[in-house]
Amino acid sequence: MDAPTSPAAAVADGVRRNLDSRHVTTERIASGILVAILGVGLLAGLAVAWIAGWPALAERLAASGGALAVIAGLGWLAYSYPAIDHRRRSYTVRPAGIEIRKGVLWRSVVNVARSRVQHTDVVQGPLLRRFDLATLVIHTAGTENASIELPGLAYETALAMRDFLVREDETSSDGEDEDERAPGAHPQRTPGIAPGPEP
Amino acid sequence: MIGIDDDRPHRLHPLSVPVCVGVQAAKLIGPFLLVVWLAKGSAWERWALLFVVLDTLYEALAYFTTRYRFTATEIVVRRGLIFRSERHIPFARVQNIDLVQNPIERRLKLAEVRLETASGEAPEAILRDLSLDAVAEMRRRVLGMPLDATAAGGEPPAGAGPRGAGAGGHEGRTLVRLRTRELVALGLAPRRGMAIVGVLTGAAWELDLLDRSAVTDRIESWWLSFGAPHALLLTALVAAAAIVAFLLVSVAWTIVHLHGFRLERRGEDLHLECGLVTRRTATIPRRRIQLVSVRATLLQRWLRCVSIRVETAGGIGDKEADTTSRRWFVPWLPAARVCEILAEVRPDFDVEPPAWMRTAPQTRRRMMRKAILVSLLLTLGAAAIVPPWGLAAGAVFLPLALWHATVAARILAYARTAGGVAFRSGAWTRAVSATRGENVQAVLLSESPFDRRWAMASLRVDTAGAGPAGHRIDIPYLERDVAARLYDDLAAEAGRSPLPGGKRPG
């Protein structure tokens, strides 16, 4: 395969890369927020119990201890798990396609040939926007893996990868990239609903 | 052949208005009488009825609001009175054209037309009703085009020529025809047998949980009045009667749905029709098939028969009607004819590869261990619910589970065929599925914590429209390095076979 010339193709270097390290931070913040909400709920419940003075003191103490332990445990998990998860996630872009690895206990690696990519989304929530990160969503005509997410990419990288994955380019054999698209499906074209002209 | 844009908009058939109203009215007459006659209907129910009637009228209005026209490459369906929508469906994207005809429509030579594309669940367009002449015209235009490689992958190499020859004509070669005898056998298939077991268990469960009432008490005392042996006999008789009734219903259902089943090959298309009351017709372009699955239930294996299912992209609605062509591709076929039929359907999908590869050598041990664990848990559960007898259930369940694990491990196999992959599994119902590299959408290798303990991995191949066939290429218990090699191999195969046959240079 000839070395690709265009800048977008530079992403297809076949090197296995980790996600952006800022991804750990955003994951910690996101899960931290969840734990905080849960914690506030639990603490509010405890506060009510203590104010009302019900149930018995021993039970109140036990419940408080349990709740605090749960909050502490979840907090620790919210802090440490994103780093563990980060170590297990990687992606490799090759001229022929993309490969995504993930999973701590249940590990998986999925490979999508570039010719099977129907379209891609680059998604950014408010948190990711602040950190200049994005999630790349790759859609295929498949069923179970019809959309495959790759989170924690630098926004620029995500855009470059998107351009590379959906570009109709010279690496294919006869340049008619359309022909390479997956079986009969062109979601971006098929259900074209437009106001029609009068007959 | 093509080239002249026929922009003239077509309408639905005028008779579709009375037919539509009639069909809806027939459906509604029961509830209507219930509400009006019994005069019990609350205001809410009457309003609901009004909405239903309005909905009927709205559907009947489809005749006035729907137009379709053909351009050189697409069919354009326009509908709507206030909110207009215009849908452009390129011919090359049409996966299949299904027809549904109820008896009235058959008499009037009309049909409801469903155009299916690869996108999503529902048919892309439903036109009800068109005259059969209009349908023939649509078929000719939509499916009778010369080969357009922009569509689905996988032109069968054997017939890589243009689809034109014979595709437009109606001379089809009948491949499979089902007689009533075969339909009866199909209705009795153990696939439904499992459903019967389910129903009986459910019924037993219900009876156990039934609140004690005057009625149940009376039945019980009546039951016991026969004395223990007779009561037992009576129970057995009732159970047998229930099974027979269920089987009869199943057979009747099968006959009503599949009466007059016929699969034909017309040029590069497969044509399928069946149905006693509501007649369904489907046309499936051969090259749109993504996966072929051959399966045999226990009864089918005794009778040396199989069923074949295919998956085309799109139209994975959960409604029976939407998947007729796929769910019932060939429901009943003598095993000896499989090769002959598949040679007509897709010769390049190899479901009988020369050599099957077994999964890891420890597969059987692992499945046995799982079986023991599961039956142990079930036995404990049963023993907890019904103290002494639950343990006996375990004595029945354990050997069964072990037998199942042994057979399943023996059957489990895969094969790397020329340009594709095949997978075999199942102890009761055996299934073999095959697909080709150009239909592979994604390849997934995964390892659960249990897999890691055994140094195993499982490999899954995702294709478009997976689901209706009920069997997919999902190979568990592979040795880790074997799985990794197969994964690389299939990923490379998917990456290098992007072009449908005809267009690739060389």
Image (spheres, grey):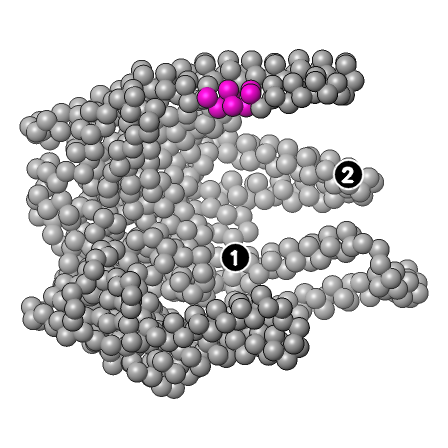
Q: Residue furthest bottom?
A: B107
Name the residue type under label 2: Ala
Q: Quadrant of the N terminus of chain A?
A: top left
Q: Nearer the viewer, residue B24 or B243?
A: B24
Q: Nearer the viewer, residue B193 or B425?
A: B193
State whether residue B218 appears in this view: yes
| Magenta range | A33-40
Asked where in the image residue B127 lies, by quadrant, the reply is bottom left
Asked where in the image residue B382 lies, by quadrant, the reply is top right
- The location of residue B311, given as percent across then percent down, is 35, 55
Q: Quadrant of the C terminus of chain A?
A: bottom left
Q: Chain of mark 1?
A: B
Residue occupied by mark 2: B383
Secondary structure under the numbered disc 2 in the rendered image: helix
Q: Is residue B196 left or right of residue B415?
A: right
Residue B436's place in the image compared with B6, above or below, is above
Q: Nearer the viewer, residue B337 or B284?
A: B284
Q: Residue at x 41, y 31 (%)?
A: B446
**What's the magenta bit mostly, secondary-structure-wise?**
helix
Name the residue type under label 1: Thr
Q: Magenta span has A36?
A: yes
Asked where in the image residue B243 lies, by quadrant, the reply is bottom right
State whether residue A91 appears in this view: no
What distance separates the C-alpha of mark 1 from that of mark 2? 32 Å
Q: Chain of mark 2?
A: B
Total labels: the figure holds 2
Return the mark for residue B297.
1
- The location of residue B159, given as percent across then percent down, is 19, 61
Return the mark for residue B229.
none
Of the residues tagged 1 and 2, which is closer to the observer?
2
Q: Is residue B213 left or right of residue B183?
A: right
Q: Magenta span has B301?
A: no
